[in-house]
Structures are given as C-alpha cells and as structure tokens.
Amino acid sequence: MALTPLDIHNKEFTRGFRGYDEDEVNEFLDQIIKDYEMVIREKKELGDKVNELEDKLSHFSNIETTLNKSILVAQETAEEVKRNADKESKLIIKEAEKNADRIVNDALAKSRKIALEIEELKKQSSVYRTRFKMLLEAQLEMLNDDDWEALESDMARQQEDAENFETAGFETDDTSS
C-alpha cells in the first residue's frame, strides 16, 4: 500500500542513543510531505488529464469511424448514382433511336404513299387529257362535217316555210312540227 502524506506526518521513529537531530528530521519530513502532496496532486491531475484525453481519443475515434463509414456510403451512393445515370442515358438513347426509326419509317411510308398518289394523279390527268382531246376532236369533226351544213339549210328551210305559212293566213301550232 502506498504512503499518504498523513502516514509520513504521523510516522514516529524510535529514539536511540545519539540518534538523528529531531528538528532536522522533522524539517526533512515536512519537506517530503509537501513534495509528496505535490506529486500526488500532479498524479491526480495527470490521471484526470489522461482520462480526459482518452475520452477525447475515443470520441475522435468514433468520429473517424463514422466519417470513414460516411465516406464509404457516399462513394457507394455516387457509384450507384453513376450506374443509374448510365442505365438511364442508355435507355434514353435507345428510346430516341426507336423514335427516330419510327419517324423515319413513317416519313418513308408517307413518301411512298404520296409518290403512289402522284402517279395515280398523273394517270388520271393523262386519261382526262386524252378524253378531252377526243371530245374536242369529235366536236371539231362535227363542225367540219357536211351534215352540219345540211342541218343548217334544213333549219333555214323550215323557218322559211313557217314564215310563208303565216303569211298565207294560217296560224302555227307550237305542238305540230
């Protein structure tokens, strides 16, 4: 068991013949008591300081562990976000390619349909032109035909007969020809 300053103070020595000077021993013991009290106080202060530093070390070790875990979680999260962004960008690209293909295919189909419609309109135009030309040629032929002149002279004769008939005193009946 360690000595306390009180143990040193209360220590009594047996006296022998021609022993030590009692005052000198007491002074020395007083000095030892003071020094020992100071050492005990320093030891207690250092013990408290060690406990405080151990608490701080434990606290900072916990913080370090937490920070390391947080960094790992952040790295994993960043990698996952990157992977997800890569997946999403690939999906967007695929969707855009599908849409582009669909748009191109729709445009080609419309182009083909319009080309077919143009061809059909060209055919119809050609047929109409040919029929109209034939109609005009038939009309010109009729105009140039001698029958037209005969029809004209018949009509002129009928009109003359009608006029002569009226002058003779007969009325014309619109129902008779």
Image (spheres, rainbow, N blue to C red):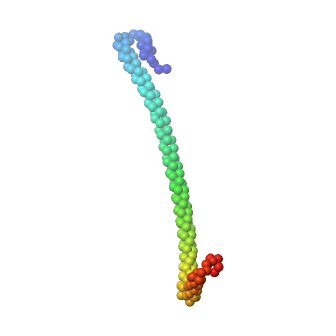
Q: Quadrant of residue 137?
A: bottom right
3 or 97, which lies in front? 97
Identify the residue at image location x=57%, y=79%. 127
Dividing the picture into quarters, in which one does residue 56 lie?
A: top left
Where's residue 143, x and y in %? 54, 85
The answer to whether residue 137 is seen in the rendering is no
Instruction: Find residue 9 and report its horizontal and vertical position in percent.
Output: 42, 13
Depth check, front residue: 100 or 165: 165
Closer to the camera in the image, 116 or 56: 116
Position of the C terminus by quadrant: bottom right
Of residue 147 and residue 138, the one placed in the foreground of this image is 147
The quarter holding residue 115 reads bottom right
Number of callouts in the render? 0
Residue appearing at x 47%, y 33% in the figure: 59
Q: Is residue 158 left or right of residue 25?
A: right
Residue at (65, 79) in percent of width and height: 176
Residue 167 in view: yes
- Above or below, 104 relative to 5: below
**Can you say whether 93 is above or below 7 in the image?**
below
